[in-house]
Image (cartoon, helix red, strand yellow):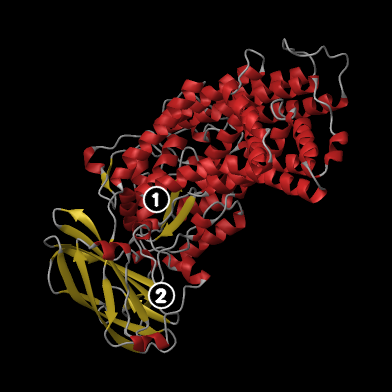
């Protein structure tokens, strides 16, 4: 086991080391000066080296509340960017094109404008260490009366930068304009005018009034399902045979060492804080180190690799099976005695130092029971965004530490707790069965991601049915292990648990024939992997589209798995696109498909009113050379999942699944991005809103 964990840690460090090299390039910041003074827009200028004396220059304009700017394709008020030196490479682009507001003016022309923020990107070629200068001219108009003001700016940026420029970006304004600074972005503006992730990593922190790139509302939304699950697991861990015997030792430690009641409660509180820190800080350190050494993209790559690649998934699967065998009594798993003894010796010392080692002893001793639970908590939270693993681990650790802290505060509570004994062996066996059931999910993830075809839905269900049937027999005393005490009679508690387990088994049986099993939708392979269904709906209607031989849509829906192909179809049929940012390892995606997409009203709208495009961000299918995708950092994506993930982040600012985007054939976003929300009525309003905007 020590070698197994050593190899896993080494793999993580290698990924961090190699990935950080790819994200080593730092943005170069320039200066922008408002010539007129008091302009209702504030500009930020920075550049990124693209190689071969070529740089990508980004202009970000933060527009004051109550004003708007215009798109490059506006016939009358388009902003202009003049470079006094440097050769332009290609035309200027608009990363925030999907955030434009459109309306038809009195002359019948379609006017496209920005509110809150606008952004323009130009590639230039110039000799190194050249100071590039130029001018910005932009019409900024009031929302109420459409009165426009011609705003002129000078800019300069040195390529490559001096140390001072790289360390201290500046956005200079003349003193006159400070009388009316641009207003900070409101919550509504942030949600509506969020910038794509391609700008987010390089955008500098500016003075008050500058609006920097933000994530979408969907990305920031907490995954409460994962948090609640982590809290439940944290409390459940107390009943494991590795943890429960530590309760009286904890209480006696604090009773002996307390000089006064106030001092004792302070020590007990610090004990709980140390337990939480020992669980949270390692995962937080991994995220922060990788983020600051290589950028957010490196961290995302690491967690994407951990949650979808076959190597970590098979390792986690093997660990769960090994722990299950240990719980059944095949062998005993413990942390190295030398490590535990050192921690014990440290706990005998006084003060906070001793309390810390007492907490460390608890974490180490309980590892053989909490290790698989911690792994599950981390993996399950990875689809909820970059910071979700830290949040869910904090929720687990808090729930785990709370009983120990309370018992240290109120030692008299120990009298009301059951004594450890044979019942803990029963808990251990029950956990063994649950370990087998949960461990299958890691094998399922690798199977779905790489299309091995080993664990289809009915095979998965068959294993679960057998596992939980054996658990029911064990609870009834019909199945015994070597370390179990002889059961003289069946208690009411065990009978009640057996009834629940066998009811669960009965609930799963119809799933073998195609029943949706909504309560388990997030934990089962997708319905499309089912070989046999009573309704006969097992044909792949998308076999003729790109990647349709491997990927499927639920409920016999027709659609696409390549964005360009979907856009072409949308233009041909003049329909909006329903873009589904999804993944094989996404539990919430399967739950949305089972609970929401299956509603007849939702299904009819998806089938008749939209072109469906599902982008799997974790699929490991190798791309043909002509389908390779180069991301904003110049890294070539050679697998379908990495390409789709880069598209989701760079073009739509979505880095969590599921993400639902409604867009027109010309790629204008019709509605705010929608994330996990199982409200059927809300989803219908979302689809209807997209249809109305399209018309």
SS at circle 1: helix
Q: Which of 406 and 525 is in front in this view?
A: 406
Q: Which of 544 and 342 is in front in this view?
A: 342
Q: Nearer the viewer, residue 160 or 626?
A: 160
- Asked whether residue 438 is in view, the answer is yes
Which residue is drawn at the image coordinates 37% and 39% (left, top)?
16
Tell me which label, 1 or 2, sits earlier in the chain.
2
Which mark identifies residue 115? 2
Q: Which of marks 1 and 2 is in front?
A: 1
Residue 76 in percent (x, y) is at 26, 82
SS at circle 2: loop
Where 455 sits versus 679, above or below?
A: above
Which residue is drawn at the image coordinates 38% and 87% (left, top)?
146
Quarter of the image where one finds residue 300:
top left
- Asked whether residue 548 is in view, the answer is no
Which residue is drawn at the image coordinates 44% and 87% (left, top)?
144
Where 630 sits versus 164, above or below?
A: above
| Callout count | 2
Which mark identifies residue 173? none
Which mark identifies residue 292? 1
Where 442 sits versus 642, above or below?
A: above
Residue 19 in percent (x, y) is at 33, 41
Q: Relative to 85, is 387 on the left or the right?
A: right
Q: Relative to 96, is 482 on the left or the right?
A: right
Residue 379 in percent (x, y) is at 52, 38
Mark 1 neighbour density, 10 Å: few (under 14) some (14–19) many (20 or more): few
Look at the image and tell me in which quarter the C terminus lies: bottom left
Mark 2 neighbour density, 10 Å: few (under 14) some (14–19) many (20 or more): many
């Amino acid at each position: 086991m020590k070698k197994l964990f050593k190899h896993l840690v080494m793999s993580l460090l290698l990924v961090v080391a190699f990935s950080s090299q790819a994200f080593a390039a730092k943005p170069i910041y320039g200066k922008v000066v408002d010539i007129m003074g008091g302009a209702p827009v504030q500009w930020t200028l920075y550049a990124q080296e693209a190689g071969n004396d070529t740089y990508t220059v980004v202009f970000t304009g933060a527009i004051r509340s109550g004003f708007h700017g215009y798109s490059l394709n506006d016939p009358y008020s388009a902003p202009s960017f003049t470079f006094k030196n440097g050769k332009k490479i290609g035309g200027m682009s608009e990363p925030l094109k999907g955030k434009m507001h459109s309306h038809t003016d009195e002359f019948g022309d379609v006017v496209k404008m920005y509110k809150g923020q606008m952004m323009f990107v130009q590639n230039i070629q110039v000799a190194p260490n050249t100071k590039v200068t130029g001018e910005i001219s932009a019409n900024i108009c009031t929302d109420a009366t459409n009165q426009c003001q011609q705003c002129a700016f000078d800019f300069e940026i040195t390529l490559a930068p001096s140390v001072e420029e790289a360390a201290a970006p500046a956005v200079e304004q003349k003193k006159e304009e400070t009388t009316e600074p641009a207003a900070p972005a409101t919550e509504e503006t942030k949600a509506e005018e969020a910038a794509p992730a391609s700008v987010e990593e390089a955008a500098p922190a500016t003075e008050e009034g500058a609006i920097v790139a933000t994530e979408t509302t969907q990305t920031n939304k907490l995954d409460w399902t994962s948090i609640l699950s982590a809290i439940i697991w944290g409390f459940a861990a107390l009943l494991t045979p590795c943890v429960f015997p530590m309760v009286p030792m904890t209480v006696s430690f604090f009773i002996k060492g307390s000089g006064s009641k106030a001092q004792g409660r302070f020590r007990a509180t610090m004990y709980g804080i140390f337990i939480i820190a020992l669980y949270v800080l390692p995962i937080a350190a991994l995220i922060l180190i990788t983020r600051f050494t290589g950028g957010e993209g490196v961290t995302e790559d690491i967690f994407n690799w951990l949650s979808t690649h076959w190597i970590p998934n098979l390792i986690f699967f093997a660990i769960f099976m090994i722990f299950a065998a240990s719980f059944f009594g095949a062998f005993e798993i413990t942390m190295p005695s030398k490590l535990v003894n050192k921690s014990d010796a440290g706990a005998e010392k006084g003060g906070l130092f001793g309390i810390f080692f007492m907490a460390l002893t608890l974490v180490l001793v309980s590892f053989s029971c909490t290790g698989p639970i911690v792994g599950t908590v981390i993996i399950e939270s990875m689809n909820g965004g970059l910071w979700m693993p830290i949040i869910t681990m904090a929720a687990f650790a808090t729930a785990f530490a709370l009983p120990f802290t309370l018992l240290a505060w109120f030692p008299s509570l120990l009298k009301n707790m059951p004594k450890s004994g044979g019942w803990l062996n029963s808990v251990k066996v029950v956990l063994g069965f649950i370990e087998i059931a949960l461990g299958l999910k890691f094998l399922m993830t690798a199977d779905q991601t790489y299309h091995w075809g080993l664990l289809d839905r009915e095979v998965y269900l068959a294993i679960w049915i057998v596992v939980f049937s054996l658990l029911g027999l064990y609870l009834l005393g019909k199945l015994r292990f070597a370390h179990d005490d002889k059961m003289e009679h069946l208690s009411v508690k065990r009978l009640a648990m057996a009834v629940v387990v066998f009811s669960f088994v009965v609930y799963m049986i119809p799933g073998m024939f195609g029943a949706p099993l909504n309560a388990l939708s997030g934990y089962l392979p997708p319905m499309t992997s089912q070989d046999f269904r009573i309704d006969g709906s097992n044909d792949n209607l998308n076999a003729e589209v790109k990647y349709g031989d491997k990927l499927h849509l639920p409920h016999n829906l027709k659609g696409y798995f390549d964005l360009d192909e979907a856009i072409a179809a949308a233009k041909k049929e003049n329909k909006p696109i329903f873009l589904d940012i999804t993944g094989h390892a996404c539990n919430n995606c399967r739950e949305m498909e089972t609970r929401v997409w299956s509603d007849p009203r939702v299904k009819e709208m998806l089938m008749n009113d939209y072109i469906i495009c599902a982008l799997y961000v974790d699929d490991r299918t190798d791309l043909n050379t002509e389908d390779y995708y180069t991301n904003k950092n110049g890294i070539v994506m050679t697998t379908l999942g990495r390409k789709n993930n880069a598209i989701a982040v760079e073009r739509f600012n979505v880095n969590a699944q599921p993400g639902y985007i409604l867009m027109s054939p010309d790629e204008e976003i019709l509605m705010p991005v929608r994330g996990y929300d199982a409200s059927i009525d809300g989803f219908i309003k979302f689809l209807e809103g997209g249809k109305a905007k399209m018309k």
